[in-house]
Amino acid sequence: MSIPGEWYLILAAALFILGALGLLVRRNVLVMFMCIELMLNAANLTFVTYSRMLGDIGGQVVVFFVLVVAAAEVVVGLGIVVAIFRRRASSSADDLNALKG
Amino acid sequence: MSAPMLAATVPDSLTFAISAAVILAGALGVITSRNAVHAALSLVMTLFGVAVLFIEQQASFLAAVQIIVYAGAIVVLFLFVIMFLGVDRRENVAEEPLRGQRPLAVLLVAVAMGGVIALGVSAHWATGAHAVAGSTTAGHHSNVYVLGKAVFTTYLFAFEATAALLVIAVVGAVVLAKRPRSGESRGEEPAGPEEPAVDGSSADDEGPGGPPALVGGGASVTGAADHGGAG
């Protein structure tokens, strides 16, 4: 008998809140992106766990699409970081105040 | 609390415990390391742990994709950008730009975690119909067979949409990362180049659309907008 799904769900919740905590407290844009990846992975783990608990392949298909969306998001996000860095020579979110009133 | 875990076999329990420790240690490493490269390597650790748990739950194809796409492509892209932007910039993690932000953040996520777990405990964790989109073990086929059949039949439209999404993302990344036409200095201030742009001597520095705006006389608005888009 394998590990019950509740443990996976608790672990995924812990991983998600660690990612959210990092996104809230860190200033480096790159590290903030990594924290978003942590949260996406927590969601993926939850989907796979529910897929196993309910015996439904749909959860794994959703994880497949989440991977694609994560790849696209990282590509565009890092392109934005590079474009910002070319202008401001800084990767800190605090320096992105060009729209400040 | 440990009673349901003891119901599992020893290898399963050990795999889960070690993977959970690796995942949480990697996540803590991401959010606490001062150097962005170390954060990226900690992220790889977490991704490997998640892949092991995918295998543990009979999602072997997703585990392979997790390693190939995440650890093989996304983290390498992260590392590439970190190296491109300079690795010597260390963030001073100890200083707190907004006073009271960190205790508030910890409080917020603690409330969120407690709320999620309380909801899960009170609502039997997983409720709903079983095997709506197809069983994970339909006819004792392999995971790749079942997943591929679901992707290419039930979810075919979404699959095609992800193809379009990827093409759009690639085009967007190329447009964003493209250097301006001729060497504009990096790190310039956004409001800086408006005055030099109108005197006509640096007209070839502008992208397409810049010179007609300069000829037209009302150069400051159009030229600045074009400049902001290209830079």
Image: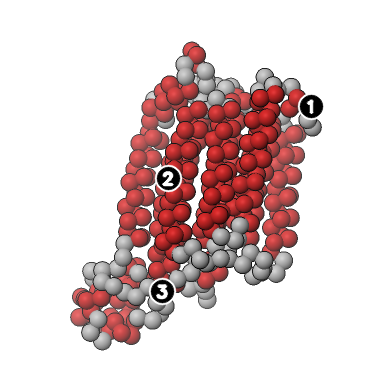
Q: Is residue B188 left or right of residue B20?
A: left
The residue lying at 32 percent from left, 52 percent from top is B171
Give percent across and percent down for residue B182.
26, 71
- Distance, label 3 to label 1, CA atoms, is 59 Å
For the residues bearing labels 2 and 1, Cβ distance under 8 angstroms: no
Question: Closer to the camera, B101 or B3?
Answer: B3
The residue lying at 34 percent from left, 43 percent from top is B164
Q: Mark 2 points at which residue?
A: B73
Q: Mark 1 points at which residue?
A: B3
- Distance, label 2 to label 1, CA atoms, is 40 Å
Chain of the residue where label 1 is placed in the rendered structure: B
Question: Closer to the camera, A1 or A17?
Answer: A1
Chain of the residue where label 3 is placed in the rendered structure: B
Whether callout 3 and callout 2 share a subunit is answered: yes
Q: Mark 3 points at which residue?
A: B187
Give percent across and percent down for residue B102.
69, 61
Q: Which amino acid does label 1 sit on?
A: Ala
Q: What residue type is labelled 2?
A: Ala
Residue at far top of view: B139
- The answer to whether one can see residue A2 in this image is yes
